[in-house]
Amino acid sequence: FLVADAITRAGEDGRPPPDLLYTDEDKIDEHGRRSDPHFKPDFNRELLWGQHYMSHLMTVRRDVIERVGGFQEGYEGSQDYDLVLRCVAETTPDRIVHIPHVGYHWRAIEGSTALATDAKRYPADAAKRALADHLPPGWTVADAAAPTAYTALPPRPDPAPPVSIIIPTRNGLDLVERCVASIEAKTIYPAYEIVLIDNQTDQPEQRAAFEQMAADGRLRLLDYDDEFNYSAINNFGVGQTDAPLVCLLNNDIEVIEPGWLDAMVRHAVRPDVGAVGAMLLYGDDTIQHAGVVLGLGGVAGHSHKQFPGDAFGYFSRLTIAHQVGAVTAACLVVRRLVYEEVGGLDADELAVAFNDIDLCLRIHHAGYRNIWTPEARLYHHESVSRGAEDTPEKQARFEAEVHVMLDRWGDELLHDPAYNPNLALDADSFTLARSPRVQPPWPRSGRSTNTLGRARVQE
């Protein structure tokens, strides 16, 4: 019924008939008790390269299966993953349809992969072979932190393309020194420059320290002599540089993993990728940012906020690079051509808040995909330099920017393709919604027997 309804709806909407459909799923034990609902995103290529998230229930057109040669030997235990990888490569994203309803109850019995991921190791080994055989030349496959999840790492161009790291500041010497020192000490990427944009520093000793850092060759120092406007400052910085890649970086960032920039660049240079974001942690090693969920909290909110920094996340998402609705500009890498194509950050109506969300949405509409990667890990001592929205003027400006986003993007904020409509927008990310934002195609009758409530679903 679900499949037939989805095919009918596609025809009514004027879309091409789907080649592949998949549903959400949950688990059921020998007593008929349901648990662990997996509310999946719409088609997400990178997530598929990190795990076979489509899995159950999945339907593929016969002619597509015949064109790719059906099941192949050598991938026993994950032959369905090998098949779906080849089928996805044979079709286009607009012909891959996600049905956001539970269409499959996976039996969780002793010894099954549904009950324990380590009960059978051979499917994971076969899945890695299938993925390695499927990926473009130069990509590598390794185990991710979560069981049955994989890291698919794209190649880095040789020579490494230069990156301009743009850091705005006003005063904030301690933050800038920590940020710059961590970049210098912990960044293995070989081709970058640091560009510090001074926005009217009024402490002479701090200004002198910035000038000394520039004289020592640690960074370039540029002046932006106007009122604080985060969008305008960054646009100015981009305009004063010429590297093919740009990294927008807050002055309250501190590098953790040496491979952070290398991992982000590897994705950013891909021709179909727009903005690339990082895993950002608070000082207590809980998560501040793991991608952005559109509509969360009203306009947008951080995914997995305050989860432990070593958590696997919702069905292992924190261990896998994947497409997201947006990423924060606190640490964002993008090709210069993409940034300029969409006009950069909106300095007219989004001076401080949501300018990065708006940028990512415009990048998406230009035909690129925004990617978040867990391979880039940094601390974000959030808004230490700018402070909180704690004055009437700041609060009024923030409310005005909220209205700009709601007017500009409207219902699109309620339909993040990387976030299932059965998950909450008015609570923590990846908790169950009080009421799904999409109704099933069948009529409702009787009382629901769902006892899951709004409990957090993790790992």
Image: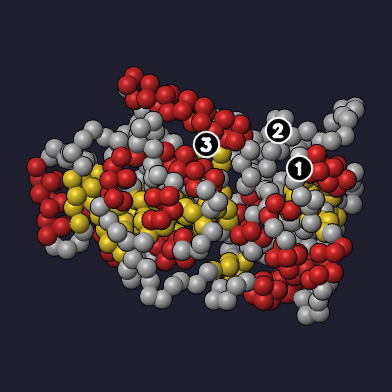
Q: Please indicate, yes or no, whether residue 27 appears anywhere in the rendered image.
A: no
Q: Mark 3 or mark 1: which comes first in sequence?
A: 1
Q: Amino acid at mark 3?
A: Ala
Relative to 170, 103 lies left or right: right
Q: Amino acid at mark 1?
A: Gly
Q: Mark 1 or mark 2: which comes first in sequence?
A: 1
Instruction: Kindly give the residue lying farthest to the front in the view shown.
Output: 14
| Element class at badge 3 | strand
- Residue identifier under label 1: 14
Relative to 135, say whether 212 is above or below: above
Discs 1/2, front = 1
Percent of width and height locating residue 38: 73, 48
- Residue identifier under label 2: 437
Q: Amino acid at mark 2?
A: Arg
Relative to 154, 194 lies left or right: left
Could you give the CA–CA distance between mark 1 and mark 2, rounded to whole angstroms?
23 Å
| Element class at badge 1 | loop
Relative to 231, say whether 379 is above or below: below
- Residue identifier under label 3: 300
Q: Residue at x 46, y 60 (%)?
A: 268
Percent of width and height locating residue 413: 58, 35
